Amino acid sequence: MAFFRVEKLVKTFGGLTAVNGVSFDVEQGQIFGLIGPNGSGKTTLFNMISGVYTPTSGKVLYKDREIQGMKPHKICKLGIGRTFQVVKPLGRMTVRDNVIAASFSRVNSMGEARDNAMEILDFCGLTPVKATLAKSLPIAGRKRLEIARALATRPDLLLLDETAAGLNPTELLSAMNLIRRIRENGTTVIIIEHIMHVIMTISDRIHAINFGTTIAEGTPKEVAANQAVIEAYLGTDYA
Amino acid sequence: MDVFLQTLVAGFLKGGLYALIGIGMTLIMGVMGIINLAHGQLMMLAMYVTFVLNTMGVDPYVSLFVAMPLLFLLGVTIQKFLLNPLIRVETILPENQVLMTVGIGMVLTEIVRFAFKSDYKYVTTEYSNRTFSLGNISFSVPLTIAFGIALLFTLAMFWFLLKTDLGRSIRATAQDKDAATLMGVNTGRITVITFGIGSALVAAAGCLLAPVYYIFPDIGGPFTSKAFIITILGGLGSTVGAIFGGVTLGLAESMGATYFGMEYEDIVGLTIFILVLLFLPGGFKRLTKV
Amino acid sequence: MKAAGSKMKKNLFPLLLLAGLALLPLVLESNYFLHLMILFLLWVVIGSSWNLLAGFTGQVSFGHAAFFGVGAYTAGLLFHHLQISPWWGMALGGVFAFLVGLPFGAICFPLRGAYFALASLALGEGIRHIATIAESFTGGMVGIMIMPTFVSKVPYYYITLFLASLSVLSIQLIMRSKPGYYFISIREDQDAAASLGVNTTLYKNVSLAISAFWTGMAGALYMNYMGFIDPHVVFSLHDYSVMAILVAIVGGVGTVYGPTVGAFIMVAFQELFRTGFFGLFAFLGKATGVAAVTALGDAVKKAHVLGFGILVIVVILYLPNGVVGDWEKIKRNVFRIHPAK
Amino acid sequence: MNLRSGVMSAFAAVLFALGIASGALAAEKVKVGVLLPLTGSQAKFGEIEKRSYEMAAEEINAKGGINGSMIELIFEDDTGKPDVGRSAVEKLISRDKVPVITGGYSSSVTAAAAPVAQQLKVPFVICTGSADDVTEKGYDFVFRINPPASEYPKAVESFLKEVAKDVKTVVLLYENSAFGQSSSKSFEKDAEAAGLKIVLKEGYQAGAIDFKPILTKVKAANPDMIYMVSYVMDASLLMRQSKELGINPKLYVGGGAGFTLPEFAKSAGDAADYVYSATLWVDTLPFPGAKQYAENFQKKYGSDTEYHGAEAYAAMYVVADALKRATSASAPTPQAVRDALAKTDMMTAFGPVKFVSYGKKSQQNKLDTYMVQWQKGELEAVWPAKVATKKYVYPTPAWNARK
């Protein structure tokens, strides 16, 4: 069985179908890319996986267990961490306290939580700003904090939603570097990304959707050459 | 049957007045997203204006033309100098504006108490007690007039919001403040005008209530509660909803008073309020899509 | 080193304050000031409890009078119906307030922001009406009257001091542990908190439960100390629900000691105004013979609620984080002390 | 830094002045503490009572005060809240060291203040607070001049027994306040004992806009009598809307509270005509000084007084009388004043005052109550017959039969 699988996921809002029968498998240790134009349903997928939305139909299977419709905090406890496209820092807490709060999903004592947090902050390169209030971080710092917080919940599967958007080239490089190191530590990653060269470089497999349905899946090379993907991104004129 | 009909009529007439109180609140809540806990106090102020004018021999219906502009100005001042500055203030609780209205309500009440003491004041007119009857059912003349005027104001507001540029700007701001700003609406100005209009409308309610009720500094509080019940019932920002909300509350209170007992009047209102909050978020607006 | 020193200082100050408060009855023989201190400490409990739910967990309740009143009525009714000492009501008052908190939370917590505030306000008012109407059970507006146990204020003072210290200490400890971090996470962003494994519904209810428990204890103590309650007194929207908010706002929302400072300011403020600065105006008027001074004194006496209102407006405009939260700002602007750079 | 030291020295000056303020007033005076609501929603009556106390104290001082020393009244504002009322009592006793406290307007403040006075052993002479409980606890330092709430309808009961014998059915409406709930309860009990049938009994929240639904029910019940315990503006609305609906019982009776106030008649207009009310006092009662008190009050303050004022006025005389008897050579002690109060037996403008024990009550003044009726805009005493200024109009003429 697959480590993680979604089966024919459907989500409708009123009369609008945001996701329409998407299925894919993710193997343990992969970096799995999810691409698609704006409004194609990627974030809705993430919200269904992480429990924010209950799917209209379909299944989400994680380590052979159906998890669709579970509450977000339960899903977090099962070992699925996520970041938000629009970052949600716990603004009036310090960077360290943000990560400590997340650490409490695994430990109960203050001492352990603090140790876990320090380790993660160090891993993510946030130690220098640990005493800064999260709301006063620059955007790159906030994105990094999102990841650090998600990591502090010790996930086996990490959902990254546009972590690279808004970063300058230097920041991009170090972000990609961080994602690779996360995978090296044994965490499986599903990543939504718009910046093509980022996703093409780091992903092992890529799944492309448009208008809520799958249009392609394969290695970065295969997907990049796929006619439907090119059309979706560039419009039919360029095909 | 008579008991039922009389209750129905009483509830309906009272509901018209409630609607007028509710429209101002619904606009303010819809556009600014804040609960104005000084709404009843603004009405109280208008009632005192009516009272003072009445001692000079001015009819309450004439004092509408004085109280409404006065309260409009007061509303504008409050929004401009006390509420809008809070948007820029960094605080832990986003409800700061609501808490500010609590403070404003206290100040208004106490200033009036200073000026007029806690005594009950009343505006007596020769038509205060006048009634007419249809069959066995008696209608209070001033309440019927109030109902008519409330209906008139609601229709006017409906037209204003739908057909005028300013009205459209207000609706745009209520729907999405950021988008409205991007479309070139000066949302700061809109909130100021909206608060002014809301205050003027509740002032009208005060003038209409004055001949049938009485006036004292603490009268605001209960009407503030009624106003937010009406607003939640009707749905935020919906003028037609406010009419529905007002009449529903009026009817529910009257029916509750007749068939449960008068002491349950307020509980009936609060219960409906909680039920709507829980099971019909968005109020009647959700049902009618108006 | 410096950081450690300042931390020591931070912990030392409350201890010194506590020691001072514990010794107070030895130097202060006036029952009157002791009574004011008891009121102050009572407000420390209520304000701190409200602050836990609103300031730390972000759920702005306009219905805390419900818990205060339930606590008071637990003590009162135990005595009224069963002749059980209202002191038993102290423990039970907290428990019953907690129990009332369960449906309260179930109704209000699905709602967010202003809707939460409105629902809590409606529930608080609803329970007052019920207590008024259920005459045969609660005694209605006739109220419940008991003879206070102690003649001296000193036992009440120490009991209230104990309750106040315990509640503040418990809140401080909570805020330094897992639930505290979870409360603040919920306040800052419920969705983010949930994604980090926080069961937001559970922890909101935990916060409410603790808050209701302490508020209920305060209510039961009020019954014991004041000897009289009726629904309009202990379920009062204005005197308890709103006042609890004002105490916290003035002192500093979301700070552990803010409500303590706020409670002191509010109680002192009310008494200063009510008595015309302890008769200072009347005395000055008499001494100088200027009628205007006496008149001013009378005006001040009458203006205490007006003063509250103005205080609230000024604090929200200029000290939105309260005296404790904006202490640096106050030091800068009022005392003109600039931190050495 | 300068500013800071300035603040400090100003603070020190204030403290110093406070010290003088409390010290300087200890001249040769007899202090009397008065607890009243001077701000807040009950301030109207607090003000009337305050003026009455002041007027009485001036009269007593003009006649030589308490064996030569002048009475000094120390008013404390209870703002209508029990905890504040308690602050006030604590201050009066421990800072001002008064030998006696009087006043007490609202039931809740009085009920919270009485135990304090009892425990600290300072006599408390209540002039208005009417909760029955207060004099049922065996407090030997608490005295009450006015009757408790449950006794207000006494005169109504005798009127029903002797005049309105054909009244068989009664509707009872009352506001949900301490006074409303307790006096309606005792009226119900007594009415049923007298063989009357209560066909409808409804409480309501003070401040309702519209009594039509309930009055429609009343009309359908068609009672012989409507008994209402309401405060002044609810009273006025009840009568105005009864007129609108044309409800015609044999008599409308108010159970004290709002129905006797001038504002009731003014705001209800002709709807107030023929309405009866229970009351504790009117200025036409044949008590020495009653008429004069009302006239002097009107002259001095330019506004009317009513029974609350008379209670306060009488309370001052009762306290002064006790102080005189308690003051021999030294200043009066609270204990001496209490003992003197217990022996009080005097006549006042409010009626005879003597603190007695009966039923569960102790140290309670026992007074007759009266019935008044609005006739042509004037409040006339009509019952008992021996104090009547006009004859009662019974039964009440139907609305459409009036001119």
Image (tube, rainbow, N blue to C red):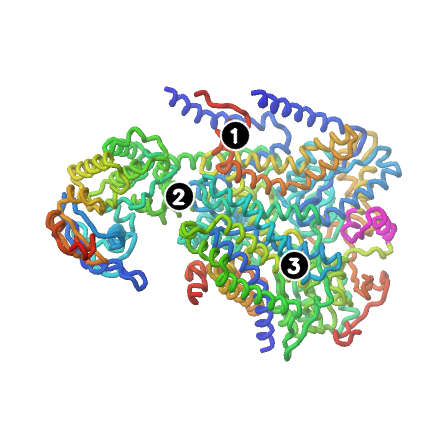
Picture coordinates of residue C13, whole percent (x, y): 47, 26
| Residue found at x 36% / y 46% | C190
Q: Which mark is residue B12?
A: none
Picture coordinates of residue B147, whole percent (x, y): 60, 67
Amino acid type indicated by mark 3: Phe
Label 1 packing within 10 angstroms: few (<14), some (14-19), many (20+):
some
In the rendered image, is residue D258 in sight?
A: yes
- Which residue is at the front of the view, A137 or D155? A137
Q: Residue furthest front?
A: A237
Helix, strand or loop at mark 1: helix
| Residue found at x 70% / y 31% | C280
Magenta residues span D287-312
Q: Quadrant of the C terminus of chain B?
A: bottom left
Picture coordinates of residue C149, whole percent (x, y): 59, 40
Q: Which residue is mark 3?
A: B65
Amino acid type indicated by mark 1: Ile
Helix, strand or loop at mark 3: helix
Q: Which residue is mark 2?
A: C187
Q: Does label 3 lie on the same chain as label 2?
A: no
Q: Determine whether C170 is above or below D364 in the image.
A: above
Picture coordinates of residue B60, whole percent (x, y): 69, 61
Q: Of tags 2 and 3, which is closer to the observer?
A: 3
Q: Which mark is residue C330?
A: 1
Chain ID, mark 1: C
In the rendered image, is residue D186 in sight?
A: no
Q: Determine whether D332 is above or below C54 in the image.
A: above
Residue D303 part of the magenta-drawn span = yes
Query: On the image, which quarter does residue A179 sit in?
Result: top left
Chain ID, mark 3: B
Helix, strand or loop at mark 2: helix
Horizontal relation, residue A57 to residue C170: left or right: left
